[in-house]
Amino acid sequence: MLAEFLKDYLAIAIFLFISLGLSILFIIINFTFSPKKPDPEKLSTYECGFEPFEDSRMEFDVRFYLVAILFIIFDLEIAFLFPWAISLGSIGLFGFLSMMIFLFILTVGFVYEWKKGALDWE
């Protein structure tokens, strides 16, 4: 029983060891041969699209968060579309209509955000 179990998963274990070994090898090669001459621009602090002035607790525009949240929302839409597209043949008309309702609600939200000017960058 144990030998059969190990035989079934031997290819996966070999793949994991090879991928882990290649990953470590690539990191070592990159660290060894990369240039090590940082300039002041590379070492400067970057935070939310502008240079830091004085205090790290200063106020900044909320549009950075809004754009990030909108990106996550529409990225999740795509994550829901892939499994739906694969199983569309088996879920039938009910699955198709429920996804169309989901996309309609998402489109209404997108149009609302567009009309409110949340996507305008000044």
Image: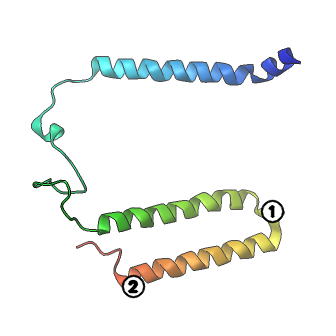
Q: Position of residue 92 (x, y in %)?
A: 82, 69
Q: Is the residue 92 above or below the residue 19 in the image? A: below
Residue position marked by numbered label 2 in the rendering = 115
Q: Is the residue 93 above or below the residue 58 in the image? A: below
Rounded to the nearest whole Å, what is the CA distance between mark 1 and mark 2?
36 Å
Instruction: Give the quarter of the image for residue 28.
Output: top left
In which quadrant is the N terminus drawn? Answer: top right
**66 or 42: nearer the viewer:** 66
User: Which numbered tag is attached to residue 41?
Assistant: none
Q: Position of residue 42 (x, y in %)?
A: 17, 38
Q: Residue at x 18, y 45 (%)?
A: 45
In which quadrant is the C terminus drawn? Answer: bottom left
Q: Position of residue 52 (x, y in %)?
A: 14, 53
User: Which numbered tag is attached to residue 89?
Assistant: 1
Q: Residue at x 76, y 63 (%)?
A: 88
Instruction: Give the quarter of the image for residue 90.
Output: bottom right
- Farthest top residue in view: 3
Q: Residue at x 39, y 62 (%)?
A: 68
Q: Residue at x 79, y 73 (%)?
A: 94
Q: Is the residue 31 above or below the residue 47 in the image? A: above
The mark closer to the camera, 1 or 2, is 2
Left or right: where 67 falls relative to 82: left
**Residue type of the residue flagged with mark 1:** Gly
Crowding around mark 2 (Cα neighbors within 10 Å: few <14, some 14 to 19, many 20+) is few
Query: Which of the two labelled residues, at mark 1 and mark 2, occupies the earlier sequence position?
Result: 1
**Residue type of the residue flagged with mark 2:** Lys
